[in-house]
Image (tube, rainbow, N blue to C red):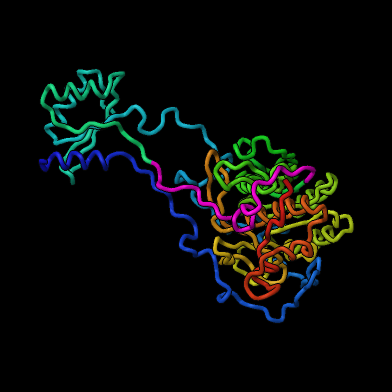
Amino acid sequence: MSFWKILAIAAVLTAAPQLSLAEDSCSGGGCGQPDAGAPANPSHPTHPNHPTHPTHPTHPTHPTKPGTSGHTEPNPSEEPGPTTNGEHSSDGPRNGPPPIVAPGEGEYLLSGTADQIRTAEAIATKTGATVLRREKLSSLGVGMLVLDLGGGSLDDLRRALDQNGVKVSVADNSTYKPAATVRTYATDLVGAQSIGECPPLKGIKIGLIDGPIDLSQPTLHGVDITINRMISPDAKEGSMSHATDLAALIAGKGTAPGTGGLAQGSHIYAASVFERSRDGDVARAESIASALEWLIANNVQIANLSLAGPHNEVLASIIDLPVMRGITMLASVGNDGSRQVAFPASDPNVIGITAVDANKRRYAKANIGEGVDFAAPGVDVAVPMGDGATYRTGTSFATAYATAIFARNFAEDGNSASIDTESKSAEDLGQPGFDDNYGWGLLKISSCKK
């Protein structure tokens, strides 16, 4: 085989676009943190069968910028991962219109020496082809043409080139996909796979206090979602990404194996409280208070608050009202790497959720301390997006899994979900018994009535 023919074949193999999968956030296990590196609190009391935390010391109010006091944020340090097509999600609706023509569709490649390519171009244009692009691969010593055959066939072009003795390589402009599949581990970790496919929940109402939701996502088609905008009319709603991901993890339909929500069939009451500001998306304490009132008015049984911020006396007093005893509230402990759990997870009436990875190691940035009650998958978890999935990391997403598990177990047992009931089935992690890193341990789905 001649040197130039080898180069021509190499050009065909290397010229077509190859899409690479962006590096996952926290790859190589960097997001998980083993117990040894985590500060322990040997003086922390053990709480056997205790439904709530011991009273927590009031947090000092975090310093805030003028005009932002009383705001909470949707765990700003949470890390989006790459989608399975190599793209990251952006704010706003995450499904833009598809291109009219797919990359490479209807395009054909010719490669060879400079003289061969010049001759081939003249012959190709006589057959009705149009040159879309010319590329000179100088380091390879070859040139390349990208053609639109104008209705002609590849075989016709090859015959015309052969009849004129032009020795070039010809092929369609093939496209390639990443050699990757959607990686899922969360459902296995919480025991969902071992009990088989569960039927949809009936009569379960789940509150989601977060941002707006993109209902156009395929994962949410047919999901029963009631949305109430809780911000002022002149405010601009925050990003759809965060709340959409949470809703998908709780009750969404799987767009890839292992990505379906664990509480499918439940009715989600979504209170949109996040609004845009110069400091990013924030939720006012008053909006959260209004959202809690709306959930109570609609007899919601379980509420997800994947948000974090400073202690707020007004919110704390509302959460402590007797009427609030009818709703189980779960909140993310926060992602600041702090030794103090964020509010409202730190409140004794709220169940605080931390995140672990596929190896059951605590997320390195998760806050620790009094107020951590349970752990759930939250590092590089697969979240349905479009017709595939993306990956998310943070205690917010762990809280979504925890919310779905609480809802599932509540539906199966017929009793109010609580720390007391869930601690009996949780898998102990870290130090034996209750600890400040994992609380009572990894939440598990206890059963599934067929």
Name the foreground residue: 423 vs 344: 423
Q: State yes or no: residue 194 in magenta.
A: yes
Locate the C terminus by quadrant: top right
Which residue range is magenta in the image? Answer: 177-204
Locate the N terminus by quadrant: top left
Q: Find the residue positioned furthest to the right.
A: 322
The main secondary structure of the magenta stretch is: loop
Where's residue 355, x and y in %?
62, 61
Where's residue 201, x and y in %?
74, 44
Horizontal side, residue 99 vs residue 219: left or right = left
Where's residue 47, x and y in %?
77, 73
- Total numbered circles: 0
Residue 201 visible here: yes
Residue 268 visible here: no
Taking the spot 56% from the left edge, 41% from the top edge, the residue there is: 255
Residue 81 position (above or below residue 126): below
Taking the spot 18% from the left edge, 22% from the top edge, the residue there is: 159
Where's residue 304, x and y in %?
72, 53
Name the foreground residue: 269 vs 319: 269
Residue 47 position (above or below residue 141): below
Q: Quadrant of residue 434?
A: bottom right
Residue 133 position (above or below residue 341): above
Horizontal side, residue 117 vs residue 335: left or right = left
Name the foreground residue: 155 vs 340: 155
Q: Quadrant of residue 168?
A: top left
Q: State yes or no: residue 142 in magenta.
A: no
Name the foreground residue: 126 vs 236: 126
Q: Quadrant of residue 203?
A: top right
